[in-house]
Image (tube, helix red, strand yellow):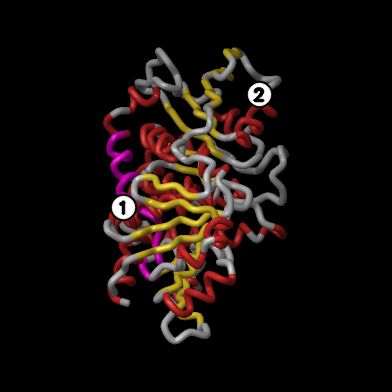
């Protein structure tokens, strides 16, 4: 299939996850479809400006060969702008009616890019057609997931380059956050979360046999730690605070590239949502995932589905590692087993997490290798388009 143009629609609701995923997919598609016009259509720009500091508050702009246009501006100028050969509707964002009307006459492929899921049923639904009233336009469901039969996860070359950079430049990167510190034989991690109680984590780390450095990211993370630390701090230097053997830094908001640089040099990452969660997995380092809370604890079905995919994908490990894996996956579930994003203390126990840190690191590296080799979303999507 010859492709001259691609449009990607994204509706940002209340977080950075949607635009983070779309921004990443867009950059990678541009590397593959170098001579293809790619437009990203956004309902608003505030969150995008936060993760990409070159974005301006204008309706139409081009950055690194990608065109960014507001949905309102495209709708007002649809007669002159037209549609694309392929358009991607990210996360059920509902493309406006006039675009769909024109696309049924001039476009070739409509891809409904769904949210990432570990649930088994998506494998049967992946690449299935949704019947629409058009002789030339076909609509298919694209289901990202953690198995070979699913649509995979986003593995972009820029991230892999930063991953390699981080492996070689740990001291240089960490110096930006903790000046004049020695990181030899120290444990360093990042925390990026929704609101929650981190007391269980802090109580384990304050007496851990290694000194620990934590980089705290995002307003909700900052609020979560401040809620606990206001009565516990042993030293307070503004953005850098201490509690026992833990040194914490309240980081400013980082661009997508800056965030990836940091998580690539540390020893472990606490992540949230979808985009940072997948980056955490792909690094092959111990991670915790704070999933977005849903009513009636529906999010727990997604957590359990992910832990099932994780367990079945990690092969050829010892009996001892198998026990550690079971503990680790159970910890992931306990970490998210809650009704509200409150500051109520949870049931999760991190003692074994740090006691078995090296074994968990080994397990995470095996799982990362599996995803990198067999679950590359953009490569799978490109192959489908070429064969369409």
Closest to the observer: 3 or 225? 3
Q: Is residue 385 above or below residue 312?
A: below
Q: Is residue 290 magenta?
A: no
Look at the image and give the residue range highlighted in magenta. Answer: 148-165
Closest to the observer: 357 or 38? 38
Q: Residues within 10 Å of mark 2 (few under 14, many from 20)?
A: some
According to the picture, the residue beneath numbered tag 2 turns out to be: 229
Q: CA distance from mark 1 to mark 2?
A: 37 Å
Residue at point 57%, 35% (across, down): 218
Total tally of numbered discs in the picture: 2
SS for tag 2? Answer: helix
Quadrant location, the C terminus:
bottom left
Quadrant position of residue 260: top left
SS for tag 1? Answer: helix
Closest to the observer: 309 or 315? 309
Quadrant location, the N terminus:
bottom left
Q: Residues within 10 Å of mark 1 (few under 14, many from 20)?
A: some
Q: Is residue 164 magenta?
A: yes
Q: Residue 296, can we see it?
A: yes
Q: Residue 329, can we see it?
A: no
Answer with left or right where residue 385 lies relative to residue 275.
Answer: left
Answer with left or right where residue 340 lies relative to residue 60.
Answer: right
Quadrant position of residue 228: top right
Lower sequence index among marks 1 and 2: 2
Q: Is residue 84 above or below residue 108?
A: above
According to the picture, the residue beneath numbered tag 1 turns out to be: 369
From the top left corner, tell me how far across and down residue 37 is, in percent.
35, 59
């Amino acid at each position: 299939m010859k492709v001259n143009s691609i449009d990607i629609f994204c509706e940002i609701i209340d977080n950075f996850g949607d635009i983070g995923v779309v921004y990443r997919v867009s950059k990678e598609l541009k590397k593959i479809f170098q001579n293809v016009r790619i437009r990203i259509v956004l309902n608003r720009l505030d969150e995008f400006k936060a993760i990409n500091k070159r974005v301006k508050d204008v309706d139409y702009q081009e950055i690194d060969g990608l065109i960014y246009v507001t949905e309102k501006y495209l709708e007002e100028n649809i007669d002159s702008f037209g549609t694309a050969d392929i358009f991607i509707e990210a996360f059920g964002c509902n493309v406006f009616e006039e675009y769909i009307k024109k696309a049924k006459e001039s476009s070739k492929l409509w891809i409904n890019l769904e949210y990432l899921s570990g649930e088994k049923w998506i494998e049967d639904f992946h690449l299935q057609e949704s019947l629409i009233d058009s002789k030339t336009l076909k609509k298919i469901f694209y289901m990202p997931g953690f198995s070979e039969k699913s649509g995979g996860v986003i593995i972009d070359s820029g991230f892999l380059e930063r991953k390699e950079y981080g492996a070689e430049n740990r001291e240089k990167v960490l110096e930006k956050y903790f000046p004049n510190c020695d990181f030899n034989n120290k444990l360093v991690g990042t925390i990026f979360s929704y609101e929650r109680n981190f007391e269980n984590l802090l109580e384990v780390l304050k007496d851990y046999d290694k000194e620990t450095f934590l980089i705290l990211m995002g307003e909700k993370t900052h609020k979560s730690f401040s809620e606990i630390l206001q009565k516990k701090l042993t030293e307070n230097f503004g953005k850098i605070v201490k509690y026992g053997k833990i040194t914490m830094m309240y980081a400013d908001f980082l661009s997508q590239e800056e965030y990836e640089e940091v998580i690539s040099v540390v020893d472990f990452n606490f992540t949230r949502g979808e985009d940072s969660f997948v980056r955490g997995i792909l690094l092959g380092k111990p991670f915790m995932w704070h999933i977005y809370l849903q009513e009636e604890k529906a999010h727990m079905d997604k957590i359990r589905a992910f832990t099932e995919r994780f367990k079945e994908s990690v092969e050829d490990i010892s009996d001892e590692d198998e026990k550690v894996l079971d503990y680790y996956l159970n910890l992931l579930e306990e970490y998210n087993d809650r009704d509200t994003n409150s500051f109520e203390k949870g049931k999760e126990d991190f003692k074994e997490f740090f006691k078995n840190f090296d074994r968990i690191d080994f397990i995470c590296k095996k799982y990362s290798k599996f995803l990198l080799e067999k679950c590359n979303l953009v490569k799978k999507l490109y192959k489908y388009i070429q064969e369409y």
